Image (cartoon, rainbow, N blue to C red):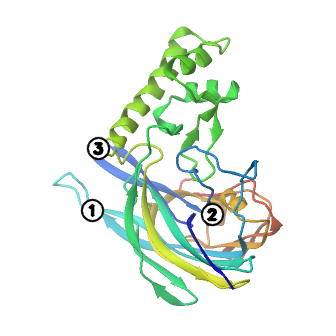
Amino acid sequence: MEKSKNVLKIFSISFLFIFSLEVMANPLPTGSSGRTPNPNIYGMFNGEKMMLDGKLIDEDQDIRMTSELVEIDENGFCEYPSFAPDMPPFRLRQAKIVGSYYLYNTTQNEIEEEILFPVPAIFKENLTDFEVYIEDKKVEYSLNKFFKPRSSFLFFKDSFSSRSIEILEKANYLKPCIFDPKIIDLSLLEGSYLTIKQKIDSIKEITSKEKDEILNSIMEEFRHSYHNDNGAGHEHRGGSFNLYEFQIKMKPNEKVNLKIKYKTIIGDENSFTYTYILQTGKLWKGKIDKSIIRIKPAFPKQMAKYKFSPSKNILIKEGKVEFIFKNFEPKEDISVEFSADR
């Protein structure tokens, strides 16, 4: 059987990273996001699209993710240092995440793939104890950085005001970014400075000040991307990533269990919010047979103070939570909130 190396195909694997919130001088992680493993459709990091025989590729051509089991244990803790000399360290809640992803090589060829676990370099992510296993065998990985190129029309959402986001959405110029909810896709504005300005100027029923604000936000992001092109990467801009990289080999029609383990902060002791992004799973070939997201709550006797979304496909019993999806193409994500004051 002829062996094929598809080194240009890149896969991103489920992870959690933290939001950073400044309270006085102390940045506090207050939430996190995780996601289903997904193949990198060529250009997903820079807004380009890949065509095959004249057709737009919107999912992987060779590998299915037949099922996944993600277990999130909210019961860990760690300390986050205070920058104030007279204040003790912050005690923060830490989740242990174990994701088991079952991949199936649908081809008659042996495949060698490069796999990525991209951690957005927007916030201090504080990922620890990262481990990768293929069929229970530990796999070595490397950690590299990817900076958003100047050609990209992916932007950090928080670089725009809420009013600008509202305007762009209403004008149908904004598309959500499937692999990161904090990044937006403005490729529908793509073009020269004059083209971008003309498109923004054509938006009706907004003020000149609002138009200038949108344009200035875009140009500011491009300025940082220009520095990226010239070797001065800016880690805290949308579209920039820390990349954990490793290799996987699959025989013809082989099924492989890929397991990722790590820990990360999800919030403080008594209040936290995090998201698990299911929609990235739609980039695998075909539908997912079964997906289980299993949560071990930090407060199993206070389930009334939790808020889970979506409200369907969820089973809450005896202080345990499971989201179960079957034969589906994910179209929404999971969010979890807890507040002792609720």
> At label 3, which amino acid type do we have?
Ala
Q: Which mark is residue 89?
A: 1
Q: Secondary structure at mark 3?
A: loop
Q: Is residue 162 above or below residue 259?
A: above
Mark 3 vs mark 2, foreground winner is 3
Task: Determine the image quadrant of residue 71.
Answer: bottom right
Task: Determine the image quadrant of residue 317.
Answer: bottom right
Q: Is residue 20 above or below residue 81?
A: above
* Image coordinates for residue 246, horizontal then vertical, percent: 47, 74
Quarter that holds the N terminus: bottom right
* Image coordinates for residue 94, horizontal then vertical, percent: 44, 69
Q: Is residue 310 left or right of residue 223?
A: right
**Residue under the point 29% across and 42% down:** 24
**Marks 3 and 1, how far apart in space?**
33 Å
Contact (Cβ within 8 Å) of mark 1 with mark 2: no
Say which residue label 3 marks. 232
* Image coordinates for residue 202, horizontal then vertical, percent: 65, 13
Choose the circle earlier in sequence order: 1 or 2. Answer: 2
Q: Secondary structure at mark 2?
A: strand
> At label 1, which amino acid type do we have?
Pro
Asked whether the viewer can see residue 311, the reply is: yes
* Image coordinates for residue 40, horizontal then vertical, percent: 59, 59
**Residue under the point 68% across and 77% down:** 103
Mark 3 vs mark 1, foreground winner is 3
Asked whether the viewer can see residue 319, the reply is: no
Choose the circle earlier in sequence order: 3 or 1. Answer: 1
Q: Is residue 195 left or right of residue 311?
A: left
Task: Determine the image quadrant of residue 268.
Answer: bottom left
Say which residue label 2 marks. 38
Which residue is farthest left?
Answer: 85
- The residue carrying pointer 3 sits among few (fewer than 14), some (14 to 19) or many (20 or more) residues within 10 Å by Cα, namely few
> At label 2, which amino acid type do we have?
Asn
